[in-house]
Amino acid sequence: MSYSIGIDLGGTHLKLLAATLSGEILERTRLETGGDQTGSGDWKEQVAAAIRQLEAAQNGPALFVGLAAPGLAAADQRSVATLPGRLPGIEGFDWTEFLRREKTVTVLNDAHAALVGEAWRGAAARYQNAILLTLGTGVGGAILADGRLLRGAIGRAGHFGQKRK
């Protein structure tokens, strides 16, 4: 069976799920990241180990892997470009290379990823225009306009709580 793995890497929790390509959830897991401020990067190994467990439970590798994280995703969507003060070592970290995947591990801002999911299978599925606001460890947001996620010139579109650098 073809399936994908979605990862939500937060400042305090790591959430993963395996889902069919039509969106049926096969399995979920949730772990503490501990808000790793030490620079140890243990959260990276936690992600890799959790993926191995999900793939073992599904008796084979996932067709696609995607990762959502706070901060701004890089233009090539292979890493997080900016996330000051949290999860040391995440900025510029290439997930495709680290996880040794043939297909690119797409990285999105967590609020952007949430709106993509809502537009696909959730509350925004019937709409071409929507705004999403996230409230958690930080504040974030995303905008869907004419059926497309707005990213903006540097990936900051819709980030209502993002400070300007």
Image (cartoon, rainbow, N blue to C red):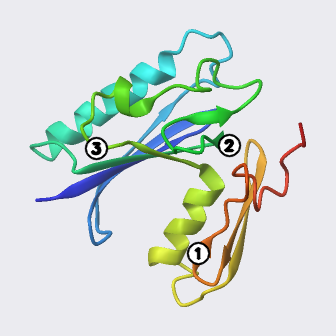
The residue lying at 32 percent from left, 69 percent from top is 23
Q: Secondary structure at mark 3?
A: loop
- The three-letter code of the residue at mark 1 reads Arg
**Element at label 1:** strand
In the image, taking residue 128 as reference, residue 52 lies left or right, namely left
Which label sits on residue 126? none
Answer with the quarter of the image where residue 33 lies. Answer: top right
Where residue 141 sits in the image (x, y, percent)?
Answer: 74, 60
Q: Does residue 38 sit above or below 68 in this rendering?
A: above
Residue 123 percent coordinates (x, y): 57, 80
- Closer to the camera in the image, 120 or 97: 97
Front one among 6 and 143: 143
User: Residue under circle 1?
Assistant: 148
- For the residue marked with disc 3, what is the amino acid? Lys
What residue does disc 2 label? 72
124 w.r.t. 152: above or below: below
Q: Residues within 10 Å of mark 2 (few under 14, many from 20)?
A: many
* Vertical order, 16 against 115 (above or below): above
Q: Which residue is mark 3?
A: 103
Where, quadrant-wise, is the C terminus in this rendering?
top right
